[in-house]
Image (cartoon, rainbow, N blue to C red):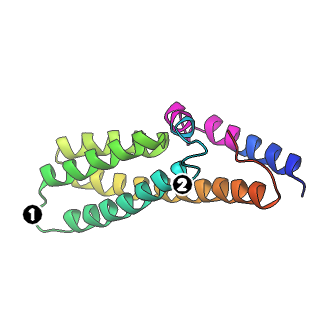
Amino acid sequence: MDVAQLKRQLFEYTTLLFHEGFLDEQFTQLQQLQDENNPDFVVEVVSLFFDDSERLLNELATALDQQNIDFNKVDAHVHQLKGSSSSIGAQRVQRVCIAFRNSCQDKNVEGCLKCLQEVKHEYSLIKNKLEILFNLEKQILAAGGSPPV
């Protein structure tokens, strides 16, 4: 595939991610911070998001598996996940976190467990989709193209 085709594919894929609500304007703002001096900025920030999210999802699962659930602790983890997903523009993860926090405030165990499954699902989807996006960017560079702006 030539560079022009790859760039068109990247543009269409990115547009789809926005259209389907996976990403919001915050992701665009993140991309605008990337330049020649820091060409891997977005990948690095998103990688930190992946690491942080996986840790938080494990902590949430552990906290919700306790006999006496500390809803304040669960809410603090969800609040942190909401903030980090918001900072990279992972809109659908952020939305589930809002519902998750409501269940925490209501001390609704079933609601929290349901939200945990939903947030894991949305996280898995956005992780996969961003990995595809970054792979397309690597293909463009490998084909001799310039980094997307």
Please tell me how crowded label 2 is: few (under 14), some (14-19), or many (20+) other residues with Cα within 10 Å: some
User: Is 138 in front, or is 100?
Assistant: 138
Q: Which residue is mark 1?
A: 68
Q: Residue furthest right?
A: 2
Q: Residue furthest front?
A: 37
Q: Amino acid at mark 2?
A: Val
Q: Distance from label 2 to label 1 (Cα)?
A: 39 Å
- Name the residue rendered at 70%, 47% in the picture: 147
**Quadrant in which residue 35 is drawn:** top right
- Name the residue rendered at 46%, 43% in the picture: 88
User: Is 9 in front, or is 97?
Assistant: 9
User: Is 4 in front, or is 33?
Assistant: 33
The first of marks 2 and 1 along the sequence is 2
Side (left or right) of 114 relative to 10: left
Q: Which quadrant of the rendered structure holds the C terminus? A: top right
Spot occupied by residue 85 in the image (x, y as percentages of width and height) = 41, 45
Spot occupied by residue 76 in the image (x, y as percentages of width and height) = 20, 49
